Image (spheres, rainbow, N blue to C red):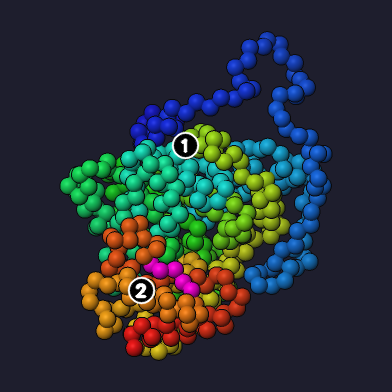
């Protein structure tokens, strides 16, 4: 890592002091070493010990269609292709940062789709998105360090942060309930400029953790102008921006716009909300991605786009915390991309996944807007910009029982009604960094449109949610 790299002072003490021991090091210097010695050092099993010699994989042409015989390919014991991952290598102890063939595919995808402004970046594969986030906390967070987080968030991240001794600080989302916007740059600027008076007993933040495109739970995306201002603040206060992007490719038009389900690859790419990496000139943005939403969560496979100066730190973190990602997962993803026609074919698959989610989102929003609860103003869906969730505001201030402070009690009653009538969702307060901080903005639920077999089930869900809401108000 170069001495002038701006994130160097932010590296955690545990990472600075990390000195792994390797049994193959600390050996005498050998002159005239044999050019082709017999390898008896590492405990690598010969690949012929592996019980699997090959496998056939059949792919769908698009979501919810049966497998297509034209999309049948073989995973080979030993491959002669440079871009293909075979059993001999993928089932072996392998590169800590991922198979080189897969990393090369990911690099091409990032260049084509994400388009970082700098060329000084590289790829590290992870065991899913949360593993990448955990490694970021390992590398940068000392006990007592603070991390800024949008007040509603993917709460498992909080567990990882606290495990490393970090302190999550929520950023208020002032425009959430009224305007359905993720717009907090003025709030963040005030927090950073007046940190000593607002949080006199806490260290100034090292990091902003954000889900900028398809925020979980809200499904909203930050505007480009908002991101630019956030980045300017990060530059001014030397903040790391940890950009969590599991949903950005499930990109939506508004429910009342005519959808285009026949996007070319260029049209799809141009429709996406831009990444913070598109404005990052100093290497402070760490982008975390996952294959969970566009391939399968059980793969436990993802990757990070990071500055090259950080590669060694992440490699050592992986060696200690998780080792390399599953070779089984890497062989599936890499060779699927090849069978689909390379990066361009992979983009087409992602577009088809996006299309299915867009259909579900629009269908569910329209179903909700036909209900009595919506027409009476008892509930208001938030039309998401990306993702697999629709959040619904329960307008409890219209309830005769609302006394200005009993948000939680009324939302509890709503939840009981819903469970009894036959629909379950996540209470907004359960996705808050600090529930007491966010009480007045937590009168919403998060509903997942991803798991049901057919969109018709979303019609029934909308009606049941309406019945549960009307029962609360009437």
Q: Is residue 83 magenta?
A: no
* Nearer to us: label 1 or label 2: 2
From which residue to which does the magenta span run? 424-428
At a point 48% along the width and 82% down the height, the residue shown is 421
Measured as percent of width and height from the top left, residue 272 is found at 47, 63
Residue 310 image label: 1
Measured as percent of width and height from the top left, residue 341 is found at 68, 58
Q: Which residue is mark 2?
A: 411
Q: Decide if residue 161 is on the left or right side of residue 58.
A: left
At a point 34% along the width and 64% down the height, the residue shown is 182
Instruction: Identify the secondary structure beneath mark 1.
Output: helix
Front in this rendered view, residue 443 or 81: 443
State which quarter of the image contains the N terminus.
Answer: top left
At a point 41% along the width and 51% down the height, the residue shown is 158
Tag count in the figure?
2
Instruction: Identify the secondary structure beneath mark 2.
Output: helix
Q: Is residue 365 above or below residue 158?
A: below
Q: Is residue 76 above or below residue 12?
A: below
* Residue 33, visible in the rendered structure: yes
State which quarter of the image contains the C terminus.
Answer: bottom left
Measured as percent of width and height from the top left, residue 168 is found at 34, 50
């Amino acid at each position: 890592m170069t001495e002038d790299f701006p994130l160097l002072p932010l590296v955690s003490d545990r990472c600075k002091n990390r000195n792994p021991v390797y049994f193959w090091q600390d050996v005498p210097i050998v002159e005239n070493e044999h050019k082709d010695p017999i390898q008896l050092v590492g405990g690598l099993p010969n690949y012929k010990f592996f019980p699997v010699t090959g496998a056939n994989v059949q792919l769908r042409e698009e979501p919810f269609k049966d497998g297509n015989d034209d999309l049948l390919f073989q995973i080979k014991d030993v491959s002669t292709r440079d871009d293909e991952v075979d059993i001999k290598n993928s089932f072996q102890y392998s590169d800590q940062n991922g198979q080189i063939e897969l990393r090369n595919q990911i690099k091409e995808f990032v260049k084509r789709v994400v388009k970082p402004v700098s060329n000084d970046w590289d790829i590290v594969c992870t065991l899913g998105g949360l593993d990448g986030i955990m490694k970021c906390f390992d590398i940068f967070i000392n006990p007592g360090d603070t991390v800024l987080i949008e007040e509603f968030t993917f709460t498992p991240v909080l567990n990882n942060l606290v495990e490393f001794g970090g302190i999550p600080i929520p950023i208020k989302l002032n425009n959430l309930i009224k305007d359905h916007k993720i717009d907090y740059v003025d709030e963040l600027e005030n927090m950073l400029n007046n940190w000593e008076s607002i949080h006199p007993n806490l260290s100034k933040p090292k990091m902003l953790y954000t889900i900028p495109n398809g925020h979980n739970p809200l499904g909203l995306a930050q505007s480009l102008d908002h991101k630019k201002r956030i980045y300017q603040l990060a530059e001014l206060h030397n903040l790391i921006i940890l950009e969590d992007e599991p949903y950005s490719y499930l990109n939506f038009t508004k429910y009342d716009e005519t959808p285009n389900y026949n996007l070319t690859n260029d049209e799809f790419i141009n429709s996406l909300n831009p990444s913070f990496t598109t404005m990052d000139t100093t290497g402070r943005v760490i982008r975390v991605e996952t294959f969970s939403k566009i391939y399968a969560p059980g793969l436990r496979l993802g990757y990070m786009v990071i500055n090259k100066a950080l590669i060694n730190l992440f490699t050592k973190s992986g060696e200690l915390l998780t080792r390399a990602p599953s070779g089984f997962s890497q062989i599936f993803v890499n060779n699927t991309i090849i069978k689909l026609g390379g990066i361009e074919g992979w983009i087409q698959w992602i577009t088809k996944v996006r299309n299915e989610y867009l259909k579900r989102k629009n269908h569910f929003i329209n179903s909700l807007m036909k209900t009595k609860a919506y027409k009476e103003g008892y509930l208001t869906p938030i039309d998401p910009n990306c993702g697999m969730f629709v959040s619904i505001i329960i307008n409890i201030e219209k309830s005769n029982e609302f006394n200005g402070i009993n948000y939680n009690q009324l939302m509890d009653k709503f939840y009981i009604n819903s469970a009894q009538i036959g629909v379950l969702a996540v209470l907004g307060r359960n996705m808050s960094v600090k529930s007491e901080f966010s009480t007045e903005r937590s009168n919403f639920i998060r509903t997942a449109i991803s798991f049901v077999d057919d969109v018709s089930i979303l019609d029934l869900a909308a009606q049941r949610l309406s019945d549960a809401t009307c029962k609360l108000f009437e």
